[in-house]
Structures are given as C-alpha cells and as structure tokens.
C-alpha cells in the first residue's frame, strides 16, 4: 500500500549506480541521489496535497452518507459512519498512538481507542497497527466512528439573492456555516448542497454559530476572491442588530478598544492594550423597559468584536452564553475588569464548560466532551423536553414554506423530512447510541445578534429584522 507523504528509495532500483558498476562517478551519484530525493519529496508533497484536497463533504458520496429528519422543531441527522483523518503533528512524533489519542482526542476514554486500534478501525496509513506503535512524520491517522451530530433549528435557510456568481442567504441561528467539531451535515454548506442543490460554494465570510443573518457565498473562485478583497479593504459596510441588557445610552457610542484573542483553542477574546486595533459604532434603536435593541456597525472584523465591545461597555448581549457570564468577574468584564490572569480565565472557562456545556461556540474546540446543546438523560425523556411549538417547529415551518419554499427559490424540491426508523442505525460499541439526550430548548438555539445589512461597491443586501428586535417584544417565559 502506498503511504501518503512517505518517500522511499529502493536500493538497486532502475537507474541506480548499482546497476552499472564503474560507469558513474561519485559526483554523478551524488547529483542523481539529490535528484531522486527531490523527486520523491515533490511526489510526497503532491500526494499529501491530493489527500488534503479530498476534503470531506464536497463529493456526492459524502453528501449522501446520511440524511435529515425534523422532530420537535429541530433538524436532526441520522447517525452514520465516518472516517476522521489527520496527519501526525510534529509534537506527536515518537509517541505511542494510544497515548496521543487518549490525550489529544478526549471525546472518548482511552479504553475505547485501545479497542478501536485492536479492532483495526483506528489505522495508520490505512493499515492496522499495534497499540504500542510509535508515530512517524507524515503518518496518516484514520479513525472510523459512528457519528452523532448535534440538532439545530428546523428554520429553513432563506435565499436573499442568487445569480450565477453569488448566493446570499439568511442564516438561522444555531447552524454553523461549515463543518466543524460535532457539526457536519447540520451546517449551512451541507444543507444548501443537499436540499437546494447549491454545491461547491466558496465561503466569503463567516458568522458565529448562534448568530443569524446575512451570509455570502461565491459560486466561482473569481467572485469569492473579489468579495473577500472588498471586505479585506474595508469597502463593505456591515450593520448588525442585537438586544442587550439594560437601557443603552441614547447618543451614538464608538468603542475603539483593542481586542486580544485570549485563546484560539477555545475561542475567547477580551479588551486588552496588547490587542489589535478595532472600532465599532453603536446606536440604540429602542428600549422595552428591561433590554435595548442596538444597531452595531463594526468598522473592522476582529473575532467576536461586537460581543466583546458590548461586554466592555457594560451592555452585553442578553443571551450571550460566553461574554454575558460572571466567569469574567462580578461585573461580567465591564470596563475590562476581569480580575484574573488569562490562564485562570481559560481554566475557569473550561471548568464551567464541563458543567454547563456552552464553550466552543462554533464547534471548533476539542474540549467538546459531550454534545454542546444536548443534555443526557438516564432513561426516558422527561416531560420538560417536550417544548411548546417554536418558530422552528414543523407546524410553523409548513406555514413559512407555503410562502417561500426551496423549490420556489432554487427549483430543487425539498426531500421528505419525516422520521424513518429504518434509517436509524445503531452500533454496539458506540457510547452515544447508549445514551438518551434531551432536545435543546429554543433558548439554547439563538443569540440575539443578527447580521442585518451588508453594502459594498455597487451592491447591497439585507434581511428582515428578527422578531426579538421589535420594540414591544417580550422575553418568552420558560
């Protein structure tokens, strides 16, 4: 079997000096060896690049590996078998494969990885190895798992604009833009490909999983590059709306505090003199007696910029599970007063995540030890898991689909989304098959932050305002 990224030069191969004794000088042998090595390295790089180019989720067999069903206002994915692959990282070289998986991939206990290695479902270069195998440079690790995805809202993705080069959609909250962490088919790019037949879209920008609103995709590399360049050159004006705690000041406020990434691994930022320059303008739109709707105009594009600036000003987004939390101190980070070191903040965030399951907002974190939005139940689902119909319920979905459907927008009929027991696979070794999970509640699926309007050179798009942005809106009771 050919091993990706491994260059092997066999002695006595055709063209080697050994085949023609006395006819090749040492200098020629050296030059020949250098050429062979260069060729092998080039081949290895091309093989590695080819393997990486086969990104999961961009071929028909990937799209068809499972399907969706709607239940309790949620879009769910039937469990399916999936092969996770990764190349050996430099820090893993020389370590035992079992030790690496037990430490780096904590979704399962070490005993489960030991079972997978012995069963041959966790392989190196697609070959079975012993649990004491020590990893080498460019080893390709592959692990076959029975994959369960986290439910997302059943709200349909409305197409705001579509032409041969560009697709603009209104992303519902709770759905990640692209595959990450525990999300794959329950992502915007997969849903658009599977249900709207909009494939090979190129991401121009992104939104956090819980953020709703405008999302632009290029249908050609040229258009994607053009739009990305406009955003990079700050030619695109963006307007967001959010609902924050308290009565936001009446006057326009510009926050220009620099933002520093505390940890890329868990995705957390803070205002810091060591951070990057950034600026956001805020203007109150309305106040309902307890909370305010605020128009946000970010002039730069830092990670979590709007949320961090609002936290600093003392008006965090009402239901921001990260920046509206006392983990940032008794004042929740107002004025940059956190009162702890970065290491302590990261440690506390991880500890709280283990208890509350909200860290890793975009599914990028390897700290996701359990489903971020699903809570395990010991037996049968309790009565409080049966929510009253929400805007994402099948009943309300049908009402909205009667006006705007996938077919009317793209000419591609939506598949049957009714639950089919025959598609529900089970694996005797799968931990998640043995645990029942309570469905996430509607409040777990939304953050009151919405990308409302984008305007660039010669173009402009906007969505309808979300229901929670109305002046007379009231927080729904539990």
Image (cartoon, rainbow, N blue to C red):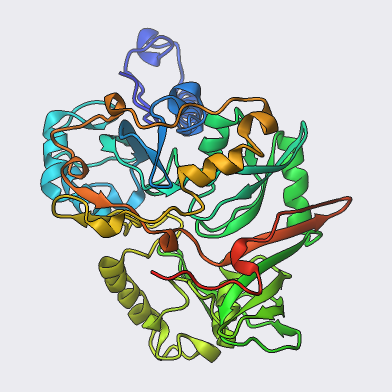
Residue 443 screen position, x and y as percent: 43, 63
Residue 430 in the figure: left or right of residue 299: left
Q: Nearer the viewer, residue 451 or 279?
A: 451
- Note whether residue 192 is visible: yes
**The quadrant where residue 166 appears:** top right
Q: Is residue 77 above or below residue 28?
A: below
Q: Residue at x 26, y 36 (%)?
A: 145
Residue 129 in the figure: left or right of residue 37: left
Q: Nearer the viewer, residue 40 or 367?
A: 367
Q: Residue at x 59, y 50 (%)?
A: 171
Q: Is residue 270 above or below residue 421?
A: below
Q: Is residue 158 above or below residue 463?
A: above
Question: Considering the image in quadrants, where does the N terminus appear?
Answer: top left
Residue 10 in the figure: left or right of residue 376: right
Question: Considering the image in quadrants, where does the C terminus appear?
Answer: bottom left
- Note whether residue 31 is visible: no
Residue 179 screen position, x and y as percent: 47, 43
Residue 212 screen position, x and y as percent: 58, 57
How many numbered marks appear? 0
Residue 187 screen position, x and y as percent: 49, 43
Q: Residue at x 43, y 47 (%)?
A: 73
């Amino acid at each position: 079997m050919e091993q990706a990224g491994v260059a092997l030069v066999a002695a006595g191969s055709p063209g080697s000096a050994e085949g023609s004794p006395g006819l090749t000088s040492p200098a020629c042998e050296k030059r020949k060896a250098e050429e062979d090595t260069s060729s092998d390295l080039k081949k290895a790089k091309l093989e590695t690049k080819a393997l990486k180019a086969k990104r999961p989720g961009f071929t028909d067999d990937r799209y068809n590996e499972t399907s969706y069903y709607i239940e309790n206002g949620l879009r769910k994915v039937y469990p399916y078998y999936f092969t996770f692959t990764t190349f050996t990282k430099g820090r893993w070289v020389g370590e035992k494969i079992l030790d690496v998986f037990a430490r780096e991939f904590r979704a399962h206990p070490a005993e489960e990885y030991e079972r997978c290695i012995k069963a041959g479902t966790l392989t190196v270069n697609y070959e079975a190895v012993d649990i004491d195998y020590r990893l080498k440079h460019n080893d390709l690790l592959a692990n076959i798992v029975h994959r369960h995805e986290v439910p997302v809202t059943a709200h349909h993705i409305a197409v705001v604009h579509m032409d041969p080069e560009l697709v603009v959609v209104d992303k519902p909250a709770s759905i990640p833009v692209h595959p990450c962490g525990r999300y794959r088919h329950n992502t915007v790019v997969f849903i658009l490909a599977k249900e709207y037949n909009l494939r090979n879209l190129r991401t121009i920008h992104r939104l956090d999983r819980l953020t709703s609103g405008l999302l632009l995709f290029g249908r050609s590399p040229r258009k994607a590059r053009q739009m990305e360049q406009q955003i990079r050159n700050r030619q695109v004006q963006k307007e967001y709306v959010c609902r924050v705690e308290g009565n936001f000041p009446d006057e326009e406020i510009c926050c220009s505090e620099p933002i520093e990434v505390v940890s890329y691994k868990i995705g957390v930022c803070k205002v810091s003199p060591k951070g990057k320059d950034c600026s956001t303008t805020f203007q109150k739109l309305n106040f309902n007696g307890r909370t305010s709707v605020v128009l946000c105009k970010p002039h730069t594009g830092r990670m979590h910029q709007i949320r961090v600036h609002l936290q600093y000003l003392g008006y965090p987004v009402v239901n921001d599970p990260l920046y509206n939390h006392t983990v940032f101190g008794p004042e929740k980070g107002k004025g940059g007063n956190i009162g702890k070191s970065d290491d302590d903040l990261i440690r506390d965030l991880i500890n709280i995540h283990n208890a509350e399951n909200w860290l890793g907002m975009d599914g990028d974190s390897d700290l996701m030890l359990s489903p971020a939005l699903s809570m395990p139940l010991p037996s049968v689902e309790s009565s409080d898991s049966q929510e009253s119909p929400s805007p994402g319920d099948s009943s309300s979905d049908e009402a909205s689909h009667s006006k705007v459907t996938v077919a009317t927008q793209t000419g591609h009929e939506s598949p049957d989304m009714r639950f089919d027991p025959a598609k529900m696979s089970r694996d005797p070794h799968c931990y998640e098959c043995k645990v029942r999970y309570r469905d996430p509640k509607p409040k777990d699926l939304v953050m009151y932050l919405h990308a409302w309007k984008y305007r660039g050179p010669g173009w402009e798009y906007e969505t309808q305002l979300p229901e929670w942005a109305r002046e007379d809106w009231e927080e729904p009771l539990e």
